[in-house]
Image (spheres, helix red, strand yellow):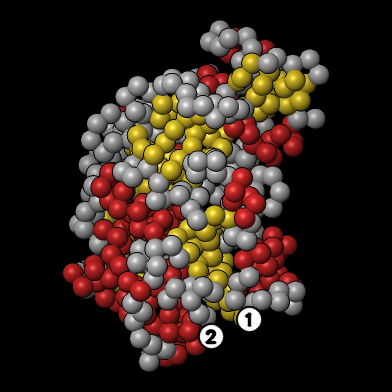
Amino acid sequence: MSFLTSFLDNVRKFPDKTALEFIDPPLQRLTYAELDDMVNRTAGYLQSLGLQSGDRLALQLTKSLDFILLHLAAVRMGAISLPLNLAYPPDELKYFLEDSGAKLFFALEANKKKIEVILSELQELKECIFLDPSKPDGFQLRVTTGSATSTQSDATSIDSQDTAVIIYTSGTTGRPKGAEITHGNLTSNLEALHSAWGWRDDDVLLHVLPIFHVHGLFVALHGALHAGATTKMMREFNAQKTLELLSSGQCTVFMAVPTIHKRLLDAPNANQFDLSKVRLITSGSDRLPDEVFTGFQQTFGYTLLERYGMTETGMNCSNPLKGERRIGSVGMPLPGVKVRVVHSETGEILPDGEIGDVQLRGPNVFKGYWRQPDKTSASFSGDGWFKTGDLGFRESDGYITLCGRSKDLIISGGLNVYPPEVERVLVEHPAVNACAVIGCPDAEWGEKVTAVVVLHKGESASVEELMRFCREKLAPYKSPKSIVFTDDLPRNTMGKVQKAELRRDFCL
């Protein structure tokens, strides 16, 4: 059964209700019935181009109705959607298209010259079609006139184990891997979040995230369509407009990453906006800094709900909708999801409070990595638990706290140093705006704790001052042995700090 089955149910229940509304130019609005019709027509258009069940449809488009129609149409007809980040240059793009064996590729007209250079080298790609989402009438006219005879696909005929979407992981070592997300994975996660977050059909989601990523596509957009809610789409994030909408009472649900929440806090006159009436505001895709958690409470009168997910599994844990939203914690496992913490070497399950490798099991866990059976096998334990690569511990009441990625763990003088613990201390210094802690090779210590620091504009602090500040709050082995200053930290499109780049740039 397709995860779109619930969307079809909502089409029948709420045909005239607004499903999607783009609130910045070009302005667009579709009811559930209109969206359903356009998805069907788009599926017919794709069939006329030769796309069949199981084929891969690659999309490198802006946040637009074109993207949404193509994505939903591909999934409805049993093909596989392949969302791609706009930041990928031609060389990387060539890898994704080759590795996935994409049959059709929709890209931006603005990138045509760059992309045409690689097209002749892609043997499995049948056609590349360039679109200009700023002129949506062109694509919609093509779909409407070219597929009038299309018939609605039966979402119930799709097997839950069929792959619906392939999303490539960042690939910190070696080439990125394509995670195969099944219809069953998507359905189980939508149902778990529907229960955990109290999704309602009268919800209005303010959507400010990219839609080529799990957070913006699966959790936000799919979540709203599953609930029969309305989604207000913002193509480009604007902090002032976001605060105005959230404080106006028009929107009930808002999902963002810590970087966006920080920008809301830094907006002019932020304390004039009261967000306490918004039903649900979540944070994910990266660790929520303590100062953003408390800043949101003090400035907006709202306690952020932090959750934990990843590309291969969708959402795993969440702080409760009703109950304690614990600072520094990602909450408890979602319905149907099992979490355990094991010793990194022996695989022994650790008692509450002890830090180890976080592993997962449940219907949300992906099928495997596309065409990479060895890497798929290596990502699971012998008894079938998925190795997340995260470090963390379980508290006695079931809350899970993450301590960073295992690859970011610093072993200095034989002792483990968890970067988030050091980062939490550094940002308490009034001059520090942001920081990231990494381990750099060192002849004496094995690895030395190195802090990369961004200061607030107009503020100053010396290396000695920050080191002294840390030594007052941390054990000596945890305190930075080296501090470097930079103007900004490298982040991906979801706001996550790219520590591999920092190690490359600062571990000389």
Q: Earlier in the sequence, mark 1 or mark 2?
A: 2
Q: Is residue 277 shown left or right of residue 316?
A: left
Q: Is residue 357 above or below residue 496?
A: above
Question: Which of the pair 116/151 is nearer the observer?
Answer: 151
- The image quadrant where one finds the C terminus is top right
- The image quadrant where one finds the N terminus is bottom left
Q: Is residue 248 above or below residue 308?
A: below
- The kind of residue on which mark 1 rests is Lys
Q: Which mark is residue 126?
A: 1
- Percent x, y for residue 417? 60, 20
Mark 1–mark 2 Cα distance, whole angstroms, equals 9 Å
The part of the image, by quadrant, that contains residue 225 is bottom left
Report helix, strand or loop for mark 1.
loop
Question: Which of the pair 37/252 is nearer the observer?
Answer: 37
Q: Which residue is mark 2?
A: 49
The part of the image, by quadrant, that contains residue 12 is bottom left
Q: Is residue 386 shown left or right of residue 485?
A: left
- Percent x, y for residue 196? 28, 44
Query: Circles 1 and 2: CB distance less than 8 Å?
Result: yes
